Image (spheres, coloured by chain):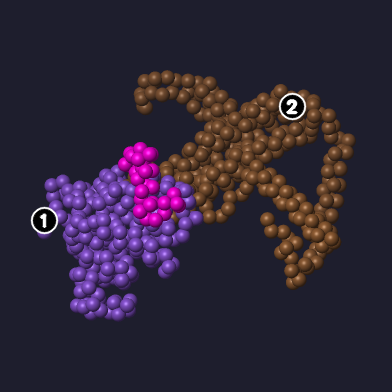
Amino acid sequence: MSEQELMVDARGVRKWFGANEVLKSISLTIPRGEVLSLLGPSGSGKSTFLRCINHLESIDGGRIYVDDELIGYKQRGDKIHEMKPREIAKQRRKIGMVFQRFNLFPHMTALGNIIDAPIGVNGESKTEATTHARELLERVGLADKADAYPAQLSGGQQQRVAIARALAMKPKLMLFDEPTSALDPELVGDVLDVMRDLAKSGMTMIVVTHEIGFSREVADRMVFMDAGVVVEAGAPRDVLDNPQHPRTQAFLESVL
Amino acid sequence: MTTDVERSTDDDVVAIPLRHPGRWVAAAAVIVVLGLLLNSLWNNENIAKQYIWQFIFDPRIIKGVWITLAVTLISMVIATILAIILAIMRMSSNPVLRGVSFLYIWFFRGTPLLVQIVFWGYLGLLYKQISLGVPLTDFHIFAVDTNTLIPAFVGGVIALSLNEAAYAAEIVRAGLLSIDHGQREAAYSLGMGPGYTLRRIVLPQSMKVIIPPMGNETISMLKNTSLLAVVAVPELYTAASQISSGNLRQVELLIVASLWYLFITSVLSVPQFYLERYYARGNSRELPPTPMQQLKRAIGRMRGRADNRRIAAQAHEKAES
């Protein structure tokens, strides 16, 4: 596979929290347009790895390239330099992220949440940003909620606004950190529908999730992580129905 | 509109309300004591009330009110700006900035305000001239006599702002700390830089926590301006005591000053109310109604009651016929 076809290229990523090594040399490549589902018990490092991809966490070893750009650092000769916050911010614009706890801005309406970054960061005009935001709200099924504040929305609606907010920056890659874990069961479906549509539209997505059914249906590939290493990777059907590694087997038995 | 008459059925709870005789006794006792106190002041022969009415709109007092207001507002604005800077310094990862901010707050909270005011008054003794030039040489771009550059008014404003900034810095810091870290992460993930995130996301949300105690601080500041009497700034209290030193009506002029302080405090709570409402937007709890909304609701309730009476009367007539 040639380099141009890779959206994410993580090479030997290592991360320490104090004396605890949470990522032990993770290497993963994600081609453009792929939907990758990250699975694993809590504490396996899957969320940390996701947060390293947009440099919400710095890394202690290895390299992460997104869209052929080294994330968070600059390579000059054989030396590696930390980036300025402004440069990191610029890199993050093409990487959307959706959080477990939604993290909508409570002092702004749904529309305000969506248009703030495109206007303030990308320099779009207000009319341009608003038109795009209304299209996105339509797309996530919340066209009538533009003027509602987050506190007036259900968890599922908030998460769909959060997805629209991330999409408003026209990202090339979307990261989902357990997007349905904080939702009431009957609200999960709407959020998964939006993600399914997004996957169909060709977006490159990395999804940390416990939704096995969703992963089986939507993901192109599934990666099982445990204790900071990639234990198993492959097509969802193979990993789920015919796990090779005993740890994968044990985990799936406890989940399914 | 459905009527009360239609809704009522046989098992309606029409209970006789529980009586609270204790409340009535307590209220009566408090009113009696309060009445005696007010009576003793009102009918006190040693308080000549005509002096209060004579001086309450005296030009010197009015000028004092304006100076008090100006000192309060200017000092609060400077203090708030300084406080935001100090709070950000205190939370910075740079140990020097953190240390300086800590020392500043330690010093200005740890010494009496009165001492600080007098100190700024005596600055001229410490530095005869203030000049802008190249340090450690004799080259000066300009040099001014300290007492010319810093008259009593400016010195007073500096003293009050620097002192207030130390307290306000902790209020601002508490506000910044109250914001969930997920808000910053969400902002960063959208490509916002640290400065933009602070301005657009963190500070506006902190305001909800910052404004109520800052309202308190503004009222403290208003009353602390009276300390500027020691450096002869002609604010409200100074004006009142200067008049009373002429006519020996100290108590009457203290009452004049107090009435003005009470009046300004009441007026200042109005912008606080609307600021709090503005920054509470998006909150799940219902906002307190504005006076206009209360008025509308009261009128609505009165209409409702009139409607109910009319409907009840009609039902009564129908039942009789």
- Residue B33 point in image, percent of width and height: 84, 50
Magenta-highlighted residues: A118-146
Q: Does the segment drawn in magenta span residue A55?
A: no
- Residue at the image point whose x is 26% and y is 59% from the top: A200
Q: Is residue A62 visible?
A: no
**Residue beneath disc 2:** B57
Res. A53 mark: none
Q: Does the segment drawn in magenta span residue A125?
A: yes
Helix, strand or loop for disc 2: loop
- Residue B279 point in image, percent of width and height: 52, 46
Chain letter for brown, please.
B
Quadrant, the C terminus of chain B: bottom right
- Residue A151 point in image, percent of width and height: 49, 55
Circle 1 Cα neighbour tier, 10 Å, few/some/many (<14 / 14–19 / ≥20): few
- Residue B21 falls in image quadrant: bottom right
Tell me the colour chain A is drawn in.
purple
Give the residue type that dot 1 points to.
Ser
Q: Residue furthest left?
A: A2
Give the residue type that dot 2 points to.
Phe
Mark 2 — on which chain does it sit?
B
- Residue at the image point whose x is 53% and y is 29% from the top: B123
**Residue beneath disc 1:** A2
In this view of the protein, which residue sits in the foreground, A75 or A201? Answer: A201
